[in-house]
């Protein structure tokens, strides 16, 4: 439709010019003695227009001839870039297909074909790493590092991942330090840092990183819970001979991280082993008052010294709510034995066995009876304990 309108306009203009030219009696006179040239005005206008058109075409031709070498260079550059892009795409496809040898070959070709060279080198390094070719991995990482400041973050992240995959955790820790110095603290780096800290036993660093990830909701709660538990257990194991350090560690923990049953049990066990019975007793009592965990009950009877009568009173208060708890009855029997309440100790131990015939209860009752010189009954419970194991 637009072409038709332009054609109509052009025809209208031609008709108008033809009509105007028929009624034009003007002329143009050129005098160059002894010559005189006389032209009609219409012919003069046509000649001027034709000369202008020819001059314009000649000028365009000259400019195009001058620009021809530059255009040839640009064409060759575009062709090389297109070839490099195809090579790089092919390398990516081969890499994701798991054909790492072909991916390495195509990435090297893309690097030589002036593709984004740092990225091509990083891809080649990843392919070499997947092939466990350490020499070529180092070579391509070196080439990627020579690409200037732009790909430094990609280079560091790739180096970090390759070090972790190869279990070079000390080298990975140094890369993390370089990332921290550059101010790069994005989520992917922090997730990788968890693996490095765990492998190197840097549990406090792991906990700090884990809390940062949880703050940004960048880690699954189940994964975070498992990592946190492991970090606390390993830290408690490392401090198990220092009661003061254990107590300080527990006091410094955020309240939300004190609800793990395994962590509480490990801490109580470590405090008992370090001879800090009072602190272990306080932690166990606080925990059992809030949440009943049977694993903690036997430890409550292991505290040596202190106010055993107060522990018996606290345990009997728990017993009112749990009259058939075998572990609690066994703990009460042991506590009463510590306080030389032989009758109560025997009755509690027998009640525990009535609920559940456990070897620990048989053994505790056997020892109690043996200390009371009731050897025949003690032997019977020793045998029962051996058979129950």
Image: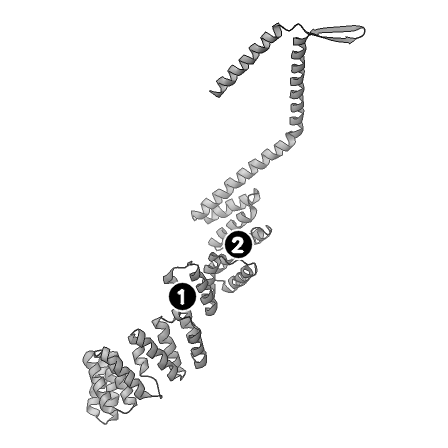
Q: Residue furthest left?
A: 354
- Residue at x 46%, y 48% (from the top left corner): 95
Q: How would you rate the neighbour count of disc 2 (Cα within 10 Å): few for under 14, some for 14-19, many for 20 or more?
A: many
Query: As displayed, is residue 68 above or below residue 141?
Result: above
The numbered dot on residue 196 is none
Tag 1, which secondary structure? helix
Pick the front one: 145 or 318? 318
Quadrant assignment, res 155:
bottom right
User: Where residue 224 appears, x then y in whole percent?
Assistant: 39, 63
Way the structure is coloured: one colour
Left-right relation of 387 to 233: left
- Tag 2 near tag 1, CB within 8 Å: no
User: Where residue 48 appears, x then y in whole percent?
Assistant: 67, 14
Left-right relation of 324 to 251: left
Query: As displayed, is residue 274 above or below residue 66?
Result: below
The image quadrant where one finds the C terminus is bottom left
Q: Disc 2 or disc 1, which is closer to the eye?
A: 1
- Residue at x 56%, y 38% (from the top left corner): 80
Quadrant assignment, res 257:
bottom left
Q: Residue furthest right?
A: 33
The residue tagged 2 is 137
**Residue 247 in sight from this viewpoint:** yes
- Residue at x 38%, y 59% (from the top left corner): 220
User: Where residue 129 appears, x then y in whole percent?
Assistant: 49, 54
Left-right relation of 317 to 160: left
User: Where residue 2 appears, x then y in whole percent?
Assistant: 49, 21
Quadrant assignment, res 56:
top right
Comes first in the chain, label 2 or label 1 = 2
Pick the front one: 243 or 113? 243
Tag 2, which secondary structure? helix
The residue tagged 1 is 227
């Amino acid at each position: 439709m637009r072409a038709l309108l332009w054609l109509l306009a052009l025809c209208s203009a031609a008709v108008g010019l033809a009509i105007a030219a028929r009624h034009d009696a003007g002329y143009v006179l050129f005098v160059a003695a002894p010559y005189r040239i006389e032209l009609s005005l219409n012919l003069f206008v046509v000649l001027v227009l034709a000369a202008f058109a020819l001059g314009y075409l000649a000028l365009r031709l000259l400019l195009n001839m001058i620009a021809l070498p530059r255009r040839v260079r640009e064409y060759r550059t575009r062709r090389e870039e297109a070839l490099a892009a195809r090579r790089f795409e092919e390398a990516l496809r081969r890499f994701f297909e798991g054909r790492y040898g072909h991916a390495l070959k195509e990435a090297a070709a893309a690097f030589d074909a002036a593709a984004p060279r740092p990225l091509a080198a990083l891809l080649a390094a990843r392919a070499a790493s997947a092939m466990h070719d350490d020499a070529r991995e180092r070579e391509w990482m070196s080439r990627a590092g020579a690409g200037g400041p732009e790909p430094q973050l990609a280079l560091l992240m790739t180096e970090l991942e390759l070090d972790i995959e190869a279990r070079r955790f000390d080298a990975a820790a140094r890369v993390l330090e370089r990332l921290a110095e550059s101010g790069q603290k994005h989520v992917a780096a922090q997730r990788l840092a968890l693996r490095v800290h765990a492998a190197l036993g840097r549990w406090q660093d792991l906990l700090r990183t884990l809390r940062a990830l949880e703050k940004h909701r960048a880690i699954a709660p189940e994964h975070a819970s498992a990592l946190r538990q492991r970090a606390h257990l390993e830290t408690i194991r490392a401090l198990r001979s220092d009661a003061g350090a254990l107590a300080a560690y527990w006091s410094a923990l955020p309240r939300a991280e004190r609800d793990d049953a395994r962590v509480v049990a490990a801490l109580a066990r470590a405090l008992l082993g370090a001879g800090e019975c009072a602190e272990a007793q306080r932690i166990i009592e606080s925990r059992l008052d809030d949440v009943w965990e049977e694993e903690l009950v036997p430890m409550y009877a292991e505290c040596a010294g202190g106010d055993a009568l107060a522990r018996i009173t606290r345990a009997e208060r728990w017993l009112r709510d749990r009259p058939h708890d075998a572990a609690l009855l066994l703990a009460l029997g042991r506590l009463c034995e510590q306080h030389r309440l032989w009758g109560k100790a025997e009755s509690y131990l027998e009640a525990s066995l009535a609920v559940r015939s456990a070897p620990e209860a048989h053994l505790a009752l056997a020892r109690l009876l043996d200390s009371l010189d009731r050897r025949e009954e003690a032997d019977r419970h020793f045998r029962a304990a051996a058979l129950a194991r």
